[in-house]
């Protein structure tokens, strides 16, 4: 049961991207109550599962008194994918301390050199291996088991720099597990046979009088433990699940608590306790949070299953009529033309008084900000800056107290975006989060925000979250201009477009067969250019990104106004080109770009508005034309991106690639 639970949890996390996997278990499977057995394999979780259940020395029918195990899927950062570099990593050949780790330890070389000087031998190329070996060094320095397991780990984590989510097991502490995080997400699932009385667990801090004099690292110590209370505790049955994502535990429990940076969670003798080494945080102005809430997830198991679809990506593309409706549900009143975003309501006056709006994100989330920059400038009449989080940090961009900074992330855990958030927080700006994950770090560390309500997105390449992010940002703009008389007609036009949008998305999805036929003509190409301008420039960037992510084909999104500044040199009769030409205020300029491409013997695929008769005057009969429904200009990019999502999906499938787990990529980028 323990092994199957671990393996099933890893399968739920396969969508995040990985190249190897492993498990570690205690008890009878390890031939002794205090032993730990590790099984690791390069490749899929199924390969690990096959290896586990092929073990001759494990009696799968034996009942054991210790019910502790850890498992991990690794995405290689330090060291090639192989069994030795896979997690769990261990302290020695006897597996005295074993660790699983998400993130990167930036000072691992210094720790490794120190430990090698103490005689420790390393077997892997990973940064993670220094953690269990450092744990063993401190354990031996402290004289062994007079330390609680949790106290031991509290003496390890101050010496780790970088981002990490860690779970530890040890032969010296059978039946126990300790977890901690800094920068990488980690939650605790709580399952009980009886009703849990408390919805909160207090944080226990280090005793200021604890001198830590015996420690070579002088870390404050704590002595108290808190139980999770349940009704009829005499017959209590409790299970605790540490996981980086709720999808790994949702089939067991929907009750979770989210750990914050430098929290230490310990399970000892069936009790869960939460601790911190001390009360001091990096942000001295941040309010002290003395407890963690146990939350009830609304996620359901069927939401993370493929259903009748072959892949998660296909399912999520075709879910967009529903995800778009869910993003607007309860927020847009089509009778009164009122838009209500409860997460922003109390902060709206401050946002309106701000100097400028900054939208900071990475990848697809960045493209959603590009897609809405123009309508946000129009509705707010304020300067709108759109920033790539990594570049924003590299430049050390000046931020002021009267700035409002929006942080967009599907997972709410993107490392660069989180680092940018903390950078802006130190400078006093108002922080706003736009995420798809309740309880994520961004949603907790921002003053206010919008949950996009797109539903779980399993495919690594984002589809429905992108279109829901666009709608969420459009609704922010509509709220901002609600009291401006001059904008009322424009607001009515946009809100009417929002009302029509789910049905129009369904019409676009009916073009799937036509798009699949186009994919058959493109899938052997080596490069593809996507051109547009105005509201469609973001569609070009996002479409090109999807093609790169899924098909491994070179693709470039080009602002057609820049054609003569270099990109036109790429165009000839052999270069595949997609041009987006919609009936909006840059239509004539897009026609000029089409003529320039045609003059170089290009034969573009044209995505255009239904019934665009004037396009026939400029487009040769040999051009392939894909007509999609027309809608108000600022929402047109929701419709134009869907054909490119479908095209990238079909090209990847024709090339024989895994669309849900593209090579080298992960769903949640939790390292810089």
Image (cartoon, rainbow, N blue to C red):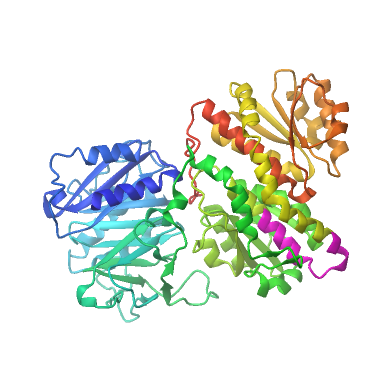
In this orientation, does residue 100 appear? yes
Q: Main secondary structure of the magenta part?
A: helix
As drawn, 640 above or below 668: above
Tell me which segment is drawn in magenta: 471-489
As drawn, 290 above or below 186: below
Among all residues in the image, which is located at the extreme bottom? 209
Q: Which residue is at 25% across, 49% downward?
A: 3
In this orientation, does residue 112 appear? no
Front residue of 649 and 535: 649
**Residue 378 in picture, x, y percent from top left:** 81, 57
Residue 486 in the magenta stretch? The answer is yes
Front residue of 226 and 198: 198
Residue 533 figure quarter: top right
Q: Which residue is at 70% across, 44% downward?
A: 639
**Residue 414 in picture, x, y percent from top left:** 53, 53
- Please count the marks in the image: 0
- Is 635 positioned to the left or the right of 241 in the image? right
**Residue 353 in picture, x, y percent from top left:** 76, 71
**Residue 549 in picture, x, y percent from top left:** 56, 36
Residue 597 figure quarter: top right
Residue 134 in the magenta stretch? The answer is no
């Amino acid at each position: 049961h323990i092994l199957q639970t671990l393996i099933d949890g890893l399968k739920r996390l396969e969508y995040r991207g990985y190249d190897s996997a492993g498990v570690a278990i205690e008890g009878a499977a390890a031939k002794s109550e205090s032993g730990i057995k590790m099984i690791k394999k390069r490749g899929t979780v199924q390969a690990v599962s096959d290896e586990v259940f092929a073990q001759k020395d494990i009696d799968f029918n034996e009942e054991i008194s210790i019910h502790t195990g850890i498992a991990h899927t690794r995405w290689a950062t330090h060291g090639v994918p192989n069994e030795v570099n896979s997690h769990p990593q261990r302290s020695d050949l006897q597996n005295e301390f074993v660790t699983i780790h998400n993130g990167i330890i930036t000072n691992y070389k210094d720790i490794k050199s120190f430990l090698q000087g103490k005689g420790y031998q390393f077997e892997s190329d990973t940064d993670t291996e220094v953690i269990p070996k450092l744990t063993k060094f401190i354990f031996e320095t402290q004289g062994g088991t007079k330390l609680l397991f949790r106290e031991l780990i509290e003496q390890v984590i101050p010496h780790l720099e970088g981002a990490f989510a860690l779970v530890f097991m040890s032969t010296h502490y059978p039946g126990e597990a300790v977890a901690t995080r800094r920068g990488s997400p980690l939650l605790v699932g709580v399952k009980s046979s009886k009703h849990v009385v408390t919805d909160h667990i207090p944080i226990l801090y280090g005793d200021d009088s604890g001198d830590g004099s015996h420690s070579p690292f002088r870390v404050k110590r704590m002595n108290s433990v808190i139980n999770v209370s349940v009704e009829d505790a005499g017959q209590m049955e409790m299970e605790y699940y540490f996981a980086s994502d709720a999808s790994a535990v949702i089939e067991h429990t929907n009750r979770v608590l989210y750990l914050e940076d430098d929290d230490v969670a310990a399970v000892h003798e069936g009790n869960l306790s939460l601790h911190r080494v001390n009360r001091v945080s990096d942000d001295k102005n941040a309010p002290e949070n003395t407890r963690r809430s146990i939350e009830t997830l609304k996620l359901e198991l069927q939401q993370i299953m493929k259903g009748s679809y072959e892949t998660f990506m296909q399912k999520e593309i075709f879910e967009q009529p529903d995800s778009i409706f869910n993003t607007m549900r309860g927020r847009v009143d089509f009778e009164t033309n009122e838009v209500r975003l409860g997460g922003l309501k109390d902060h709206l006056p401050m946002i309106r008084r701000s100097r400028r709006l900054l939208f900071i994100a990475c990848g697809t989330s960045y493209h959603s900000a590009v897609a809405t920059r123009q309508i946000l400038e129009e509705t707010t009449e304020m300067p709108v800056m759109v920033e790539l989080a990594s570049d924003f940090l590299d430049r050390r961009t000046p931020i002021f107290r009267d700035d409002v900074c929006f942080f967009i992330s599907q997972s709410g855990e993107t490392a660069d975006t989180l680092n940018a958030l903390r950078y802006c927080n130190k400078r006093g700006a108002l922080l706003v989060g736009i995420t798809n994950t309740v309880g994520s770090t961004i949603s907790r560390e921002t003053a206010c925000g919008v949950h996009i309500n797109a539903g779980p997105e399993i495919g690594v390449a984002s589809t429905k979250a992108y279109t829901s992010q666009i709608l969420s940002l459009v609704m922010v703009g509509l709220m901002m201009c609600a009291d401006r008389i001059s904008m009322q007609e424009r607001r009515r036009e946009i809100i009417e477009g929002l009302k029509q949008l789910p049905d129009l998305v369904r019409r676009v999805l009916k073009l799937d067969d036509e798009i699949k036929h186009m994919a058959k003509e493109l899938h052997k190409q080596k490069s593809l250019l996507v051109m547009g301008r105005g509201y469609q420039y973001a569609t070009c960037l996002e479409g090109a990104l999807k093609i790169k992510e899924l098909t491994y084909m070179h693709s470039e999104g080009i602002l057609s106004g820049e054609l003569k500044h270099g990109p036109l040199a790429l165009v000839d009769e052999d270069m595949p080109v997609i041009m987006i030409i919609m009936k909006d205020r840059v239509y004539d300029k897009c026609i000029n770009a089409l003529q320039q491409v045609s003059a170089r013997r290009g034969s573009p695929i044209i995505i255009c508005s239904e019934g665009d008769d004037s396009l026939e005057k400029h487009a040769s009969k040999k051009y392939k034309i894909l007509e999609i429904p027309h809608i108000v200009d600022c929402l047109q990019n929701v419709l134009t991106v869907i054909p490119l999502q479908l095209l990238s999906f079909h090209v990847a499938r024709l090339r024989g690639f895994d669309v849900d787990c593209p090579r080298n990529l992960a769903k949640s980028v939790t390292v810089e």
